Amino acid sequence: MEHKVAETNGEHVHSMKCGHTKLLHNGHVDFVESNGHLHHRDGDHFDECEIAVDSNNPDQESVVIDSEIHNDNCGHQKVIHGDHVDYIVNARLQHVHGDHVDDHGTVDPIA
């Protein structure tokens, strides 16, 4: 993955108590911004990170039965996954696909 320094608000410093959703991902902690972008500490700054489309988090049609159609106001954290937005629901990525929701695999939230 390309090294990309995250654009952050200089007034906020991510920490285990900062209030952002946190995911254990690729051996580090990612902080999920409200826009769905992931940031992780890299020395004196934060880098952008992403949940890749792979066998653990596929981008395929796998319909979730009895799921709500998520949106910016549904209460679930959105997260960038590949070229689209998913929502974290019970440690799984759910992707709105027309009139249904697809399961895009697991994530590892930190309480």
Image (cartoon, rainbow, N blue to C red):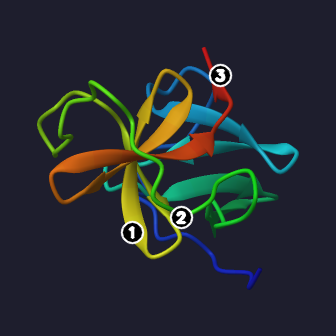
> Toward which corner of the image does residue 68 lie, by quadrant?
top left
The Cα–Cα distance between marks 1 and 3, rounded to whole angstroms, is 23 Å
Disc 2 marks which residue?
A: 59
Q: Point out the residue furthest to the right here.
A: 27
- Labelled disc at residue 84: 1
Tell which tag, 1 or 2, sits nearer the viewer: 2
> Judging from the image, what secondary structure is the residue with disc 3 in?
strand
Q: Determine contact: label 1, label 3, CB under 8 Å.
A: no
Q: Residue at x 64, y 64 (%)?
A: 49
Q: Name the residue that disc number 3 marks.
A: 110
> What residue is shown at x 47% (from left), y 70% (from top)?
7
Q: Residue 81 or 33: which is nearer the viewer?
A: 81
- Residue 78 image position (x, y, % from top left): 35, 46
Count the labels in the image: 3
On the image, the x and y values in percent for residue 87 come to 37, 42
Pick the front one: 27 or 71: 71
Task: Please tell me whether mark 1 sits on a helix, a strand or a loop.
Answer: strand
For the residue carrying disc 1, how many other residues have a C-alpha within 10 Å: few (<14), some (14-19), or many (20+)?
A: few
